[in-house]
Amino acid sequence: IKIITTHQLQAMKERGEKISMLTAYDYSMASILDGAGVDVLLVGDSASNVMAGHETTLPITLDQMIYHASSVVRAVKRAFVVVDLPFGSYQGNSSEALRSAIRIMKESGAHGVKMEGGSEIKESVIRILSAGVPVMGHLGLTPQSIYKFGTYTVRAKEEQEANKLVEDAMLLQEIGCFSIVLEKIPSALGQKVASSLQIPIIGIGAGPYVDGQVLVTHDLLGITKEFKPRFLRRYADLHEIMTSAVTNYVNDVKTKDFPRDEEAY
Ligand code: KIV
Ligand code: NA
């Protein structure tokens, strides 16, 4: 196997090397991210927001996730590709969960799946793991249950919710998940989970003491404009760069500057 494996991700945690993870939904972007050395590419159900313009991650379908995932897989030479099981494809029915995970693996060629939740989805996770599919957990802010919480604010600030999160993380490790994403929780809780568990803990808004970081690529590149949570560091302003490029193109077409003789046959 030429790609990064779950064993290599585990080894990174053990030697204290942080894991880099970013979202990808299409071939062109995935090939740039893979070439730049990102360890894990997540075909996130954030595609529902970023690619399709929905307000939440709930509407995206399994077929749509498979389309995004197969595009990403075709671009990848090194990264481990994880795909979100979308809302409604795994909750509450472990047979359906297994069927969904197998469809993703067979039809896209991805390397693993990610699922939101802890004890509530235990049976589904066990069933998928026993089919040999690597599973990444996802705890803390879980956008697929946004309507249960009503807000995208920081999670597990209270002791009870924090204790439940730690228990869920231990459970996911015990049943065999290879890694867990922790979203938007206090730094101290991220540290506690990362130091008490053996498997790599990847944070998004979970502070610096976890084993790796994940961001939505379009946020990091500044393509999305409105979204500015505190945990987001913008590494470029592609919104500005792209707007200016396209404005110049429109202007050149209008003024007949484009195309010139040397750009014509
Ligand atoms: O869908 C997504 O982009 C995610 C990350 C934010 C972890 O689940
Ligand atoms: Na997601």
Image (cartoon, rainbow, N blue to C red):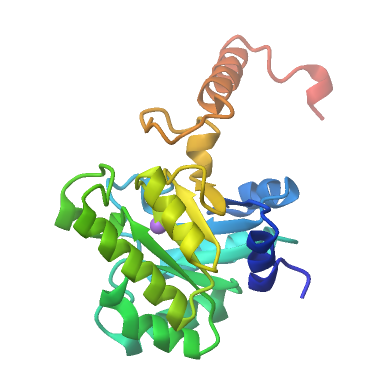
* Residue at x 62%, y 47% (from the top left corner): 29
202 relative position to 192: left or right: right
Q: Nearer the viewer, residue 207 or 232?
A: 207
Residue 121 in the image: state x and y as whole percent.
30, 77
Q: Nearer the viewer, residue 146 or 185?
A: 185
Instruction: Indicate the quadrant where residue 88 lies.
Output: bottom left
Residue 165 in the image: state x and y as whole percent.
31, 62
* Residue at x 56%, y 27% (from the top left corner): 238
Instruction: Indicate the quadrant where residue 249 lies.
Output: top right
Instruction: Indicate the quadrant where residue 151 lies.
Output: top left
Q: Residue furthest top?
A: 255
* Residue 58 seen in the current view: no
128 in relation to 52, above or below = below
Q: Nearer the viewer, residue 16 or 1?
A: 16
* Residue at x 58%, y 27% (from the top left corner): 236
Image quadrant occupied by the C terminus: top right
118 in relation to 98, above or below = above
241 in relation to 192, above or below = above
* Residue at x 51%, y 43% (from the top left corner): 208
187 relative position to 145: left or right: right
Tag count: 0
* Residue 42 seen in the current view: yes
192 relative position to 29: left or right: left
Residue 70 in the image: state x and y as whole percent.
58, 66
Image quadrant occupied by the N terminus: bottom right
